[in-house]
Image (cartoon, helix red, strand yellow):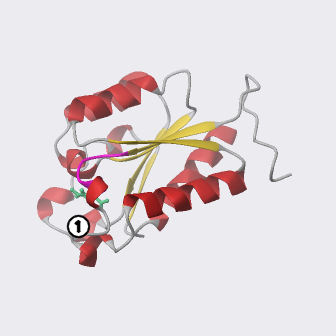
Amino acid sequence: MKEVLYRHLAGKPMKILVIHGPNLNLLGTREPEIYGSLTLDDVNERISKLASELGVEVEFFQSNHEGQLVDAIQGAVGRCQAIVINPGAYTHTSVALRDAVAGTGVPTIEAHLSNIHRREEFRKHSYIAGVAAGQICGFGPDSYLLALRAAVGLVKK
Ligand code: DQA
C-alpha cells in the first residue's frame, strides 16, 4: 500500500537525509544553461513527491558552509538510514566531508545535476565518491530522484 510507510528494522519509517551544498540555494538563476531553471524548492518538491510514492520520509538541508554540512552528516546517525548529498563545489575540495561520510558510516549516495566528468578537469575528481555507495550525475534534477531510489534500494537490501 502506497500510504503505508516502509518500516525499517526498528519499526520506524525509513528516513533519508537530502543534503544540498554551496550555491545550490541559487538554483533557478544560477547558470541555468548548466543547472536548469528549477529552483531548489522545485527540486525538493519533486523529491518529496517521489519519497511519498516510495513510502519513505525525506528531510532536507542546504548550507553554503562546510562545517555545517559536516554537522548535518554527523546528525544523520541514528536518525536517517541513508543520505543523498550534492556537495556542490566541496565535492572537489573537501576531505572533511569525505571523512564525515566515512566516519559516520551512513550509506551515502552522491548526486550532481551536471555531468561532472565532462566539464572542467578540476570537477572530475570527487573526494566523496571513494566513500559513497555510488555517484549519480548528469541528469539534472532527476539525478536526485535516481539517487533517492538508489538509497531506498540500498537500505531495503
Ligand atoms: C554540482 C557540480 C559541482 O562541480 C559544482 O561546483 C556545483 C554543482 C552539480 O550538481 O552539478 O555546485 O555539484
Q: Is residue 124 visible?
A: yes
Q: Position of residue 132 (x, y in %)?
A: 41, 41
Q: Which residues are magenta?
A: 20-24
SS at badge 1:
loop
Where is ligand 1, by quadrant?
bottom left
Q: Is 122 above or below relative to 60?
A: below
Say left or right for 115 vs 48: left
Q: Is 60 above or below relative to 23?
A: above
Foreground pick, 5 / 117: 5
Foreground pick, 116 / 25: 25
State the residue position of label 1.
Answer: 30
Q: Is residue 157 visible?
A: no
Amino acid type, residue under disc 1 in the picture: Arg
Q: Position of residue 114 (x, y in %)?
A: 31, 67
Give the prevailing secondary structure in the magenta stretch.
loop
Quarter of the image with the C terminus in it: top right
Residue 39 belongs to the span the image colors magenta:
no
Residue that protrudes farthest toward the right in the picture:
1
Foreground pick, 122 / 56: 56
Q: Position of residue 30 (x, y in %)?
A: 23, 67
Say which residue appears at 26% left-offset and 51% top-offset.
88
Q: Position of residue 97 (x, y in %)?
A: 28, 34
Say left or right for 99 vs 156: left
Residue 21 belongs to the span the image colors magenta:
yes
Q: Residues within 10 Å of mark 1 (few under 14, many from 20)?
A: some
Q: Is 8 above or below relative to 138?
A: above
Say which residue appears at 63% left-offset and 58% top-offset.
50
Indicate if the residue with disc 1 has its beta carbon within 8 Å of ligand 1: no
